[in-house]
Amino acid sequence: MSTEESLPQRPPPQPELQPEPQPPSPTRAIALSFAVSLAASIALCVVYIFGGQPQLEGLLLFFGLGGVAAGLIQWGGKLLPQGPYVQQRHELTSGEQSQEATTDTLEEGLATLDRRRLLVRLLGGAIVGLGAALVFPVRSLGERPGGSLFRTPWRRGSRVVDEHDKPVRPEDLPVGTVLTVFPEGNSGAADAQTLLIRLGHGDYRPRPGREDWAVDDVVAFSKVCPHAGCPVGLYEPDTHRLYCPCHQSVFDVLDAAEPKSGPATRPLPQLPLAVDGEGYLVARSDYHEPIGPGFWNRDR
Amino acid sequence: MIRRTIRFFDERLHASRFVRSSLDKVFPDHYAFLFGEIALYCFIVLLGTGVFLTFFFNASSTEVTYHGAYHPLVGATVSDAFRSTLDLSFSVRAGLVMRQVHHWAALVFIAAIVVHLCRVFFSGAFRKPRELNWMIGVTMLILAIFNGFAGYSLPDDLLSGTGLRIAFSIAESIPLVGTWIAFMLFGGEYPSHRIIGRLFALHTIIVPALLVGLISVHLAMVWRQKHTQFPGDGHTEDTVEGPKLWPTYAMKSLGLFFAVAAVLCLLGGLFQINPIWLYGPYHAFQVSSPAQPDWYMGWLEGALRLMPPWEIRAFGFEIPNPFFPAVLLAGGTFLGLYLWPFLEARVTGDRGEHHLLGRLRDHPFRTALGAATLSFYSVLFFAASNDLVAKWLKVPVSDITNAFRVAVFAVPALVFGVTHRLLRSLARSGAPRFSEMPRQALRKGFRPVGSAPES
C-alpha cells in the first residue's frame, strides 16, 4: 500500500496509567457459534430426510443461520481493526468550468442537428407516430366497460336459485333467515349475487312503487356493497340490519336497505320478485339501477 | 491465486485501483444506519424463497376439484392457484416453511423500509446532495407495498380475493377513466380470470426487476456520495469515520445478513402466517369476517373505513366515496414524500450540502411534523380494526368509527404540539439528552405563548 493513499487513523486515546484488565478472548464464543450452526445444519438434513417438519425446520434454520451470524458479528466487532479510520469526502461537483464545457458539448451537437431541421422534424414525427401505434396493444388489456356495469344476468322471469342451482320457494326460507341466490344458469355470478331475506309478517314497508316487489315477506337485495364491492355478508335478524365486513357499512333492511352507518352512500338495490306457476321465486326484471360501487358515469 | 485473479481482471478492466479503494472505503458504524441493510437482506431472502415458490405455484384461475392433503377442503371447488398453494404448503417438503418465510420476509421488508425512511427523515439525511436517493427510496417503498399486495393476492383465497374486489372498486372510483382503468387492469369486468396471471407476472418479474435496478442505483449513490454521519465525537462535514469495508465492515454486514435470514426463518417456522386453508377458496359471493389486510395496507383500509359517507354527484357524474380515502390520500402521501426535500429547502432557505445529520431538537418543526404524520397513519392503521376494537370493548362499531374519526385529526395535532414544545425546551435547556433535562426547562416549554419572553 503506497503511503499517500493509506488512510490516517485517529490518534488512540491517551493510555491510562493503570493497565486495563484484558477482556476474555472472543475466539471461543465465535467457535461455539459456528459449531452450533454446523450441528443445526446437520440436524436440518436429518429432519428433511425423515420427511420434514415445519417447526423443526424453522428452528434449525434459525440456529444454522444464526450461528454463522453470531460468529461473524463477533469476529467483525471484536477481532478486526475498528479504526475509526478517517476518510476525506470528495467534492461532489466537478466545478462550474466543467459544467460549462459539458453544456457547450451538448449544445454544439444539437446545433449540428439544427441545420437539418426538416430531418429532425420528420424523425420527431416518426417517433411520435410509432409511440402512438404502440399504445394500441394496451387497448387489448381489457374489454370496453360499456354497459356491463349497468346490467346483471337477472332478467324478467329468471328463476331464483341458490349456489347449488336449486330453485327456491318463498316457504323454503324460515323467518329471520337469509339466502344468497342467483338467476338460474348463473349461480356464482359476482354481479348477480342477491340476498333473499324472509322478514316477519307485515314487516315489509315498501318504498312507493315497490309494493309488489316482495313475495310472502321475502325481499331481495343486491349482495354487492355499494361502497367498495364486498359481499354484504352479515345479517342481524333482531335488528334487520346487514353489515359489510370489509368497511363496516350498515344497511337497514326495513328501511329499503338504506345505509345507516359506515362509508356507504347508497342503499342496496332491490330486486323485484314474483312467483311462477310452480310456486318458485322469479325476478320481475333486472335491477333498476347499477349494482355495486359507484363510478364516474353511473347516473348517466 | 488471489494475485493471479487480480492480475487477470486488472489487465482487462483496469479494475485493481477501483477494487482497492473500495476495500479501503470507510463506513460509519451506527445501529440507526442498519435498517436499510435489513431491508436489502429481506429482499435477498424474498428472492431466494420466491424462486422456490414459483417452481410449484400455478397462476391460474381454472376451477379444479381439490383432492390434496388438507382433508377439510377435499372435494371443494377451488382455483388452480389455490390448489397449488395448498399443495406446495402441505405436500412439498419444506414448502410450508419456504412460503411462510417468504410472507414474513415481505412483512419485515416493508417495515424495515419504513423505519429506514423515518431514520432518513428525522436525521435530515434527505437534504442536498441526497434528494435523488430519497426519491428512489420512496419509489421502492411504493413498489414494495404494491408487490406485497400482489403477492398475497396470488393464492386466490377468500381474504385476498376480497382485497382484489376492493382494489377493482378503488380503480373504478377514479373520475372519467376509472372504469377503463379497472377493466384494463383486471382484463374485464370483475371477477376476471386474467388477474391472477397478470399479478404473477408483475409480482415475480417486473417489480422485482425494477427493485433490483433501483437498489443498485440506491447503493451506487450511497457509494459515490459517501454515507452521512451523526454530529459529535469530532465528526466534521468533510470527513467520514468508521471501520473500513475490508475486512471489518464486510464481515459485520455479512453477519447481519445471516442474522436477518435467521430471524425470518424462525418466524416462518414457528409463527403461522396467512393460513389460506382457514380462509377457504375465493368465491365472489362469500366473504370472511373479520377481514384485515397485511399490516402495510392497514392505513389505506383504515382510511376507507373512516371516510364519512360523502361523495360528489353533479351533472350526472359522480366521484365515488373510495376515491378520496384510497386514491387521493395515497397519491397525496407519496407525492408529499417525493417533494419533501425540495419543500423543506424552499421553506427554510437551506440549500447547502449536508453530510452531518441533524439532531431532533435542531429541527423541531420537521421532527414534530414527522411525528404528527406518523401518528396520523398509525390512527388509520388501528382504524382498520374498528370491528375488532368494537368487539373487544363491546361497543357499537359506529361509535368506534366516530371516535377514530375524531382521533385521526386530534392525535396528530396533539403529537405535533407536544413534540414541538418538548424539543424547544430541550434545545433551550442545553441538556445532552432528554432524560437529563431539568424539570423546570420542561415546564417552560409548555407555558402559554406570550407569557415566556422569547430570547
Image (cartoon, helix red, strand yellow):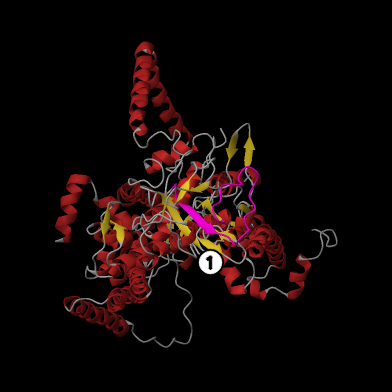
Q: Estimate the x, y position of residue B101 in percent, counting from the top left.
A: 33, 67
- For the residue pair A127 and A180, the one nearer the viewer reads as A180
Residue A123 appears in the rendering = yes
Q: In this view, does A202 lie above or below A294?
A: below
Residue at 37%, 48% (x, y): give it. A186
Q: Is residue B22 above or below residue A77?
A: above
Residue pushed farthest front? A277
Q: In which quarter of the image is residue B76?
A: bottom left
Q: Estimate the x, y position of residue B304 in percent, counting from the top left.
A: 56, 53
What amino acid type is highlighted by mark number 1? Asp
Residue B403 drawn in magenta: no
Q: Residues within 10 Å of mark 1 (few under 14, many from 20)?
A: few
> Relative to residue B316, is residue A287 drawn left or right?
left
Residue at 27%, 64% (x, y): give it. B75
- For the residue pair B349 and A36, the one nearer the viewer reads as A36
Instruction: Please give the residue where the numbered disc 1 appears in the rendered image.
Output: B233
Looking at the rendering, the stretch of residues picked out in magenta corresponds to A191-217
Chain letter for mark 1, please.
B
- For the residue pair A259 and A256, the one nearer the viewer reads as A256
Q: Estimate the x, y position of residue B315 in percent, counting from the top left.
A: 63, 31
Residue A210 drawn in magenta: yes
Q: In which quarter of the image is residue B294?
A: bottom left
Q: Estimate the x, y position of residue B34 in percent, counting from the top left.
A: 43, 64
For the image shown, how many numbered marks are present on the structure? 1
SS assignment at label 1:
loop
Mostly what secondary structure, the magenta segment? loop
Q: Is residue B177 above or below residue A182?
A: above
